[in-house]
Amino acid sequence: MFSDAFVGLVCTDCGASLAADDAEPAAIAGAGPCPDCGAPRRPEYDLDGVDPDAVRAGPRAWDRDTVLPFEADSALSAAEGGTPSVDAPRLADELGLGGVAIKDEARNPTGSVLDRGLAVAVTAADASGAELVACASPGNAGQSMAAYAGQVDLRSYAFVPTRSPFSNKAMVNVHGGEMKVVPGRLGDAVNALTEELQSDYVDLGAFASPFRHDGLKTVAYELLADRDWDAPDAVVLPAGTGELVVGVVDGLRECVELGLIDDLPPVYAVQADGCAPIAAAWQAGRDDTEPWETPDTIVGELEVADPPGGPLALAAIRETGGEALTVEDPDALESAVAVASTETVEVGLAGGVAAAGLWALAEDGTLGSEDEAVVLNTEAATKAPDVLRSHLMGQGV
Ligand SMILES: [Zn+2]
């Protein structure tokens, strides 16, 4: 079941480890946060025995199972990953950059990058013998969880806030998942899950599962493979829970350790300025995030007021020499529209935040004519096309 390089789980804070050799496989697969200190745990790997050629090849996420916890033939999959890096020459010209590629994560099975993480996390929960998985989510994670749980007829329960897009809510049910729509915002859905779900369940929330952010590592491998292992000058991605930042930097670090690239490229994490606890902590020079008191952004997927991966994301950004920054909602929507109208790629709202971040980095001179950037579109525009259309209507279109 476990891959050869998988050593076990380690706490990201106190360092306590749970070795695969010392515990029942089901106990590892069903593990949550650290029982000693409550911090998130992460899978640990012995990369010494990993053949770099084995992770160079293969288009799909599970083709790189040598650096994932589970072997591909025991994993739940719907051919996630293998998304294209779409060359965006018109965008590069407009921004005065050496090159821009859009890693289009909208082309995953449920239209978001989270499929990479939930495929691994639901695989783990199923291997643990769980009868019920659950998570509180702005929308995409709940949809993805339901989608993978359906493969093994595992009960899943998504707690989503009222503002979650209709497409997410509809598809949770279409995939066979149960759902509670909680009045309010994500924090209310988180509270409702812990207070109201009475049955035993495995929490597949970001960083509640040690496996979810680990699955996101495969984005890093792929964006480098797409460039023939020539690291870009910038990786620009949106940040909400912090899991994508952490997963991508974990993956990039492994690629350095495996000798696939020489140095970590700077990772730029972009948040909507109406809910930016990670960027605010970054700008204040803090190591930990403080809960955002009045979250208010049109980009619901990123409206995470108290990110469970705050300290880990901040440390990850710092390690790469990147930064955390904010953009305004109208700029995020404008950027999504601009990319769709010139480069064909249908960028979702969260991807629009990343694209607007790229704009900001070009305008303030952080990136210039020699720089090649990879920007992540993390979700499909068709999850909330009404918001993009409304933005146009606000401009009289
Ligand atoms: Zn701990």
Image (cartoon, helix red, strand yellow):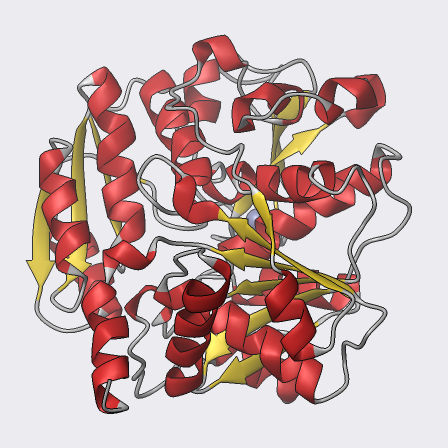
Residue at 28%, 72% (x, y): give it: 388
- Please give the name of the residue rendered at 37% of the width and 77% of the height, measured from the top-left corner: 333
The image shows residue 374 at horizontal and vertical percentages of 66, 57
The answer to whether residue 208 of the structure is visible from this angle is no
At x 15%, y 32%, the residue is 175
Q: Is residue 141 left or right of residue 312?
A: left
Picture layout, residue 359 above or below residue 8: below
Q: Residue at x 41, y 61 (%)?
A: 347
Tell me which corner region of the image, top left, top right, bottom left or bottom right, holds residue 31: top left
Whether residue 213 sits left or right of residue 200 in the image: it is right
Camera-side residue: 23 or 25?
25
Please identify the quarter of the rendering in which residue 174 is found: top left
Query: Is residue 21 at all visible to an observer of this figure?
Result: yes
Residue 322, position as x, y percentages in the image: 73, 70
124 vs 82, nearest the viewer:
82
Q: Position of residue 391 (x, y in %)?
A: 27, 82
Q: Which quadrant is home to the C terminus?
A: bottom left
Residue 385, how many percent across, how many down? 23, 64
- Relative horizontal placement of residue 203, taking residue 27 as reference (left or right): left
Residue 234 sits in which quadrant?
A: bottom right
Q: Is residue 121 above or below residue 182?
A: above
Out of 384 and 31, give the one closest to the viewer.
Answer: 384
Classify residue 392 as left or right of residue 367. Answer: left
How many marks the image carries: the answer is 0
Is residue 379 depicted above or below 10 in this figure? below
Q: Nearer the viewer, residue 226 or 291?
A: 226
- Vertical relation: 253 (above or below) 383: above
